Image: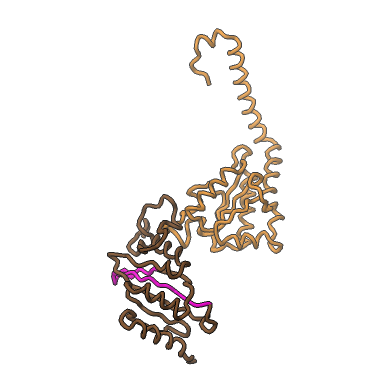
Amino acid sequence: MSAQKTSQQEDDPLAMLADSINVWVGKLSEIVKKVVDTGPIRSVVNWGRIYSLWPVNITTACCSAEFGAVSGPRHDLERFGVLPLGSLRQSDLIVVEGTITKKMAKRLRMIYDQMAIPRYVIAMGDCAISGGLFHDSYSIVNGAHEFLPVDVYVPGCPPRPEALEQAIIMLQEKIRKSKVYAQG
Amino acid sequence: MSHSQTREDGLIRKIKEQFPNDVKEARVIRRSRPEIVVVPEKIREVALFLRDQLGFDHANGVSGVDYNREGRFEIVYHTSSLQNKEMRDLVLAVKESIPRTSPKVTSLTSVWPGVEYFERETFEMFGITFEGHPRLEKLFLTDNWDGPPPLRKEVRFPTD
């Protein structure tokens, strides 16, 4: 990290000591990451993340009606640990529900930036995938992937509640297989 | 299934008696849906007559239609009445046609104040100027919009 040392630093023993400690601490964090990702700690952390996927309450368009159906008692997403909660600081998941207008895209990105890592995105409905019916319209963003990293796409106009349930299960599988520090 | 249309016919007769030269067309589409086509120069006088004499006290909406091949814009005011009890299900369409090359009409904000935002939207989407409008600015489009009015027929988007 310090390729060009000045002569003053080589003479100063305190600076040399600080430099060596810095290198050692950097290696320590590498070691911790390696231990966490290979050992049982990884599965414990991922298990915690899998069953507490809390979505943000943000609605861009009409697919939110289906999301409401999924959150209700008949399909009951809470059995997968998906609990719609008010605060976006405590949330891990954005379900982009439907058409994204250019004005709403700005707000959606703002909300994504405020969420704590790890954070996941599900694009729900044809409009959130490619613009759908409104593709290339003057006020529409052609898909959520243009400004958000999307994990799972759910096609349909609107998707059935079962499709969204399957998307949640797919996202959980994805989290289970990925490394702890590579998520979000 | 024929309904009597004495109410609609009487209404159109009254308007035609008052403005024999300015109302170019008048017809009843179906029950309680009459429509009249007015010359753009006299639209304000006709609107004042409708409001003050016939009781059309509000406008439900203002639309722009782009007849690209005929080279004209059409502006439609849907008006109806709340104060006359027997006219509450009736919607009168007042239409005016202007050439595409000079899209300028008189604003009806002074007659029905509620049309202010509808006219702003028509101005934004079709580029039709309403003269006498108090605040003719952008309403729904993004702030950095610099393209043409998006609902005009000649506007093309990348994959068209």
Q: Seen in the image, is A75 located left or right of residue B43?
A: right
In reply to whether residue A98 is colored magenta, the answer given is no
- Residue B73 lies in quadrant: bottom left
Question: Which chain does the brown colour mark?
Answer: B
Task: Tell which of B138 and A65 is nearer to you.
Answer: B138
Taking the image as drawn, is residue A154 in sight?
no
Question: Which chain does the orange colour mark?
Answer: A
Q: Position of residue B148 (x, y in %)?
A: 35, 57
Q: Position of residue A13 (x, y in %)?
A: 60, 9
- Residue A180 lies in quadrant: top right
Specify the quadrant that holds the C terminus of chain A.
top right
Given the current orientation, which residue lies at the most extreme top position? A11
Q: Position of residue A128 (x, y in %)?
A: 52, 56
Q: Position of residue B124 (x, y in %)?
A: 40, 60
**Residue at the image point whose x is 61% and y is 16% from the top:** A18
For the image shown, how many numbered marks are present on the structure?
0
Q: Provide the residue span drawn in magenta.
A: B64-82
Taking the image as drawn, is residue A79 in sight?
yes
Task: Tell which of A98 and A129 is nearer to you.
Answer: A98
Q: Is residue B41 above or below residue A79?
A: below
Q: Is residue B78 above or below residue A16?
A: below
**Residue at the image point whose x is 47% and y is 85% from the top:** B31
Task: Tell which of A64 and A30 is nearer to you.
Answer: A64
- Residue B132 lies in quadrant: bottom left
**Residue at the image point whose x is 66% and y is 30% from the top:** A32
Q: Seen in the image, is B37 located left or right of residue A31?
A: left
Q: Is residue A137 above or below residue B5?
A: above
Q: Seen in the image, is A98 located left or right of residue B66?
A: right
